[in-house]
Amino acid sequence: MKIPPVKGTRDFYPSEMAVRNWIIDGWKRVSVRNGFEEYDGPIFEYLKMFQIKSGDEIVEQLFSLQDRGGRDLALRPEITPTLARMVNQRINSLPKPIKWFSVPRLFRAERPQKGRLREFFQWNIDIIGVDDTRADAEVIFTTIDYLREVGLTNKDIKVKISSRKLLAAVLRSIGIDSEKLELLYPLLDKKSKLSEDAFKALLEENIRDQGKVKKIIDFMAIDNVNRIAEVVNINSIGENAVEELNEVFVALDVMKVPDYCVFDPNVVRGLAYYTGIVFEVHDIAGDLRAICGGGRYDNLLRDFGGTSMPATGMGMGDCVLEILLQEKDLLRKKATVPRLDYFVACAENLSTHIDMRLVAQLRSLGYSANFSYKTGKLGRQLKEADNQNAKKCIIIGVEELKDNKLIVKDMATGEQELVSYDEFWSRLKA
Amino acid sequence: MKIPPVKGTRDFYPSEMAVRNWIIDGWKRVSVRNGFEEYDGPIFEYLKMFQIKSGDEIVEQLFSLQDRGGRDLALRPEITPTLARMVNQRINSLPKPIKWFSVPRLFRAERPQKGRLREFFQWNIDIIGVDDTRADAEVIFTTIDYLREVGLTNKDIKVKISSRKLLAAVLRSIGIDSEKLELLYPLLDKKSKLSEDAFKALLEENIRDQGKVKKIIDFMAIDNVNRIAEVVNINSIGENAVEELNEVFVALDVMKVPDYCVFDPNVVRGLAYYTGIVFEVHDIAGDLRAICGGGRYDNLLRDFGGTSMPATGMGMGDCVLEILLQEKDLLRKKATVPRLDYFVACAENLSTHIDMRLVAQLRSLGYSANFSYKTGKLGRQLKEADNQNAKKCIIIGVEELKDNKLIVKDMATGEQELVSYDEFWSRLKA
């Protein structure tokens, strides 16, 4: 009986696994050096947990299931609700600030397409308990710290930064009702995916006032924080949103990554829960979806039944990132299958246990080692060593064995060395 | 709205995550040094894939779900069917032997109890394409190589080895029908969980011949391969099962782990697909379920629509292992949260950007570093450094800053050193 894999999922053969591990190990290493601690939650939660704040698109794409008691569960489409639940559960005992990261496997029952699959990995970093724009800047810095480590430069990617608080203030100053804002965010978020005319038509359909629509479009065309005043009366919006944006750009300057960052009011973020600074990273060519996105969500813990607590974070999926790294040829050299330290080959008329004993000793010392199950000609075994990408091959020959010696062959240079058994082991232990 | 986690799942706060990472990183490291390559598959597969060979218990405990097209899917309860599917898909292009490992997250909708949860991690190693008992021995060696690395000795655990082929031959020689064997395996597998009388009653119920039942019980009491002949006429069973067992024990001797291993015909394994050598690792105290189990399954690839291909493997869950490691006090010292290299504290009347700049520079050099968002008294910041388990604290004071100097405090010894800014960086880069 031959059964295919489910559409939108991936099989990770060793070469694909090497890419996945390289991406995820980098996420973990950069998180730790930026002072984040790792956490994780369950793969499934009660269905209703994802219906609180995740936004319509996510709720529509949930994989739901039931436990044996008939309770409705769902595979997690994002980890932020779990984070809110876990923090709320121990809010009094956790030292603040909470700086946590996670690399959850996530699930969305959507139509598979380029950069979007039904299961994927997502790097999440969050700082909870800090009402300070330096925390937003630190999240952005950590994001850049990873992207530049894997080889992406400011010629490849751009961090686009804006503010939900600013957007809300501008929209209110234009005369949009506060109640209408949550409805508008997902529409404004679509701008980069639509033509100018289509976007304008979409806004007019929902706002029904050409003057207001023009003001929104003018605001979204600004490319510098200093130019906001040209379009909006900053004093009239009565918020510190512009000051906050300036603070973030100063902090990014201090942390020496200003050349990656721009102000861009087109960044809105689809999710409902953002309250302040928001950002996305895009490829400069503009061919792909956002590589990652994040921002401040000061009300989420309260929405999940906890006390009010400031928070800011970022999520980066592996699918779009991998496409970009592939396009920039950054995977080929770096994401390689681990190399074998030693392959032990053995002349065909020797006992099949000699190689096995040697391999066990090497492994016990912490070296990776393999031997051949094909107890045939030496040439065939050397071919196998080559296939397994071994650094060195130890050859046990009949004559050498009599003298208690081994041949050590360097698989890169082809050089062979005859070494006594004792000498070989004392070198390894050193 | 406060929503609890689902029963039988785990929240991994940073301290629990450190334990999980320590266990899994060890699995990965030992796999690689034993010459296994990593693979993984999707979290869910078509439901029917798990109904082919997984055995009744597993099929009853599947978490099932549907995709948007209404197709029946299930969360994976084990990874072997996925392994069989993946190998079959590329059977001609994969070099043999296939030595693969994986650390899948698995799901079983069972009643949560000690050592059994609804979601868990399981280390899997498999050797495919080798019809040689040395492969069975290598799987057992790799298992021991991990267990002894985490600190378990032959005073803590025992590898119990038997053979399905031997068991089948013995049962047939006693007069049990071949067709009845698959039904009997799950019953015989229950022996260690039942009293002598209850086990006897269970057998009598299914076999209805006291003489045959006695012979089975006598066979299962043997504790040495050499004593099999005392109970069974070896020549009459006409199989090489005893020879195979002897070969495995010789190979384990060669690999220097014989003191962990015993022959034990009580090891049957519940799963239907085993065909040869089978084994389980148990705690010597006998308080816990099996720590792991495995064996040869030469027909599985064929059962999944591929060509016939010899195979042998092992699976070890994290739940029972963690309980044992906890009991033996092996987690406390080894599974620790990563320590922070530097915490940067700053006198309260200095610019809040000085610490941030320093931290960004440290991180860019690869050191883990944090600063305080509490821009208050130095004492409070040093307390925070201590809470974060920092190795060193850099103190930026007003007077020191004027002289371009830093105080570097060793958090373990309490020693403080006054270093020039240039000296500090040249040391770090060295």
Image (tube, coloured by chain):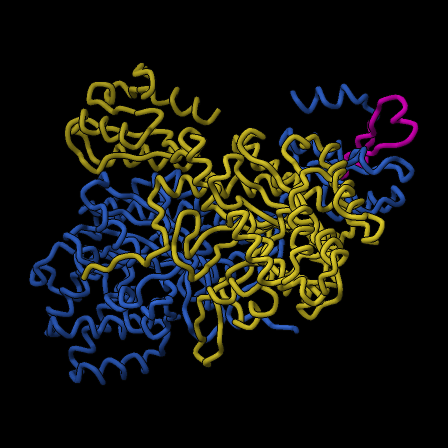
Chain colours: A yellow, B blue
Q: Viewer-proximal residue, A301 or B59?
A: A301
Look at 21% across and 58% down and name the residue there.
Answer: B300
Splitting the image into 4 quarters, where does residue B188 fall?
A: bottom left
In the image, residue A291 sits, relative to residue B213, either above or below, namely above
**Residue B402 inside the magenta-drawn segment:** yes
Q: Viewer-proximal residue, B230 or B34?
A: B34
Q: Viewer-proximal residue, B89 or A266?
A: A266
Splitting the image into 4 quarters, where does residue A32 fall?
A: top right
Judge whether residue A429 can be spotted in this image. Answer: yes
Q: Residue furthest front?
A: A210
**Residue B261 inside the magenta-drawn segment:** no
Look at 26% across and 57% down and name the residue there.
Answer: A4
Splitting the image into 4 quarters, where does residue B57 fall?
A: bottom left
The picture places residue A235, in percent across and down from the top left corner, at 85, 49
In the image, residue B90 sits, relative to residue B108, either above or below, namely above
Judge whether residue A405 can be spotted in this image. Answer: no
Look at 62% across and 32% down and name the residue there.
Answer: B366
The picture places residue A383, in percent across and down from the top left corner, at 22, 27
